[in-house]
Amino acid sequence: MKKSFRRISERTVQGIFTLSGSITSITILLIVVFLFREGMGLFRSPEIEKGYALCVHASNPVERLSPKSVKAVFDSEITNWNAAGGDDREIMLFRFDEIFSLYSEEELGGENYSLLPQKLGEVIGQNPGIIAFLPEDYLPRENVAVKVLPVENISPVDFFGGSEWMPTVTPAPQFGVFPLIMGTLWVSIFAILIALLPGLGVAIYMSELAGERVRKLLKPTIELLAGIPSVVYGFFGLVTLVPLIQNTLHLPVGETALAGSLILAIMALPTIITIAEDAMRNTPKSMREASLALGATHWQTIYKVIIPYAASGISAAVVLGIGRAIGETMAVMMVTGNAAVTPHSLFESVRTIPATIAAELGEAPSGGTHYQSLFLLGCILFAITMVISVSAEIISRKRHFEN
């Protein structure tokens, strides 16, 4: 009777664990599918603001303008059509709202504006250098003097290779993600480089050199650092590190990639120290004793036996530290300046992918191009994390095989 009850209990527990694992796996898969489905929708969206079009005079030889060129034209960075592939003629900008300052409501057809397309066609027809940004519902399609420029979908080349991130600018939003990717990698890589040696040093000390009383005091203290909210680290960086960097290095602003790297290094230290120390302490006692019996010193045993044996655990510590750095949001957003520009040094302001998602998701209309671009940023973050994890796993297996 007891054996039957025990067998039923074991099978029940096994079934619960199996069901729990299956539900977790399916949930993760659905999240990934949803993330990529929303993000990839960006490449099915038009380059120009949805529901609008660009019109020029029919005599204008320009057949198409890239989103970057459109922005340059409407920002008055390009003022002559010859810079956009057209004739030597000054560009005249015209936005839809300007029609109401040229004609009265009666001239536009009353309350329903029935004559609005006709009047827009007249304005475009009278100005050979014009470029008009108009709603598609009011396009003067039947006017032979008007040419509507073709609009293509946002391309992956423009998204991944673009150097400007301005998702709300009109008439052509700029979704150049390259500065955000570089900002994320720049801050994260330097954070790990800063944290790696101190983290491994503390792990070696706690595992091999510290007494039991010191270790029991240090380990809970270090683990407690991992539980501090990131916003607290952000406030610490904003109040302490940012002014210190600005005054010491005589910079215009202290919110720089260096400040972000230092904060992330501090936040990654508990993860690196704890996991690396556990990996070293799991080295078999027999291996330590064998090394010492062969005449090796304590230090030789540490770097010739213990560290190589714990290499996979140390690699895992580094990977988790990088993951903590790459995925961090609030602290980085508070100390890096949030400037979406490609960094060239640690002393410039940068913006990371997580900070961009956190700062802009609340203001992005659901289902719009801005909304989709933020989901695509999440896909990039997911891909970066996957590459790092897979690479570390391959390295760990290789080292384990060689050992």
Image: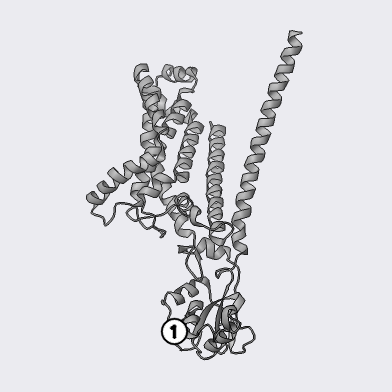
Q: Which percent across, then down, holds residue 107? A: 54, 87
Height in image: 38 above or below 241? below
Above/below status of 221 relative to 131: above
- Looking at the image, residue 333 sits to the left or right of residue 287; the answer is left
The reply to whether residue 150 is visible in this rendering is no
In front of the other: 204 or 370: 370
Residue 77 shows up from this direction: yes
Way the structure is coloured: one colour
Vertical relation: 138 (above or below) 166: below
Residue 50: name its quadrant: bottom right
Q: In the image, residue 316 lies at what x, y percent?
A: 50, 35
Count every numbered label the image shows and give the total.
1
Rendered residue at 46%/45% (across/down): 326
Residue 98, given in percent of the width and then of the height, sits at 47, 80
Q: Secondary structure at mark 1?
A: loop
Quadrant containing the N terminus is top right
What amino acid is at disc 1?
Answer: Asn
Q: Residue at x 50, y 31 (%)?
A: 313
- Residue visible at 74% across and 17% down in the picture: 8
The answer to whether 314 appears left or right of 367 in the picture is left
Q: Nearer the viewer, residue 12 or 105?
A: 105
Q: Which residue is mark 1?
A: 80
Give neighbour class at mark 1: few <14, some 14-19, many 20+ (Cα, 10 Å): some
Q: Which residue is located at x 45 percent, y 74 percent?
A: 72
Tell me where residue 117 appears, x and y as whole percent. 59, 83
Residue 167 position (above or below residue 1): below
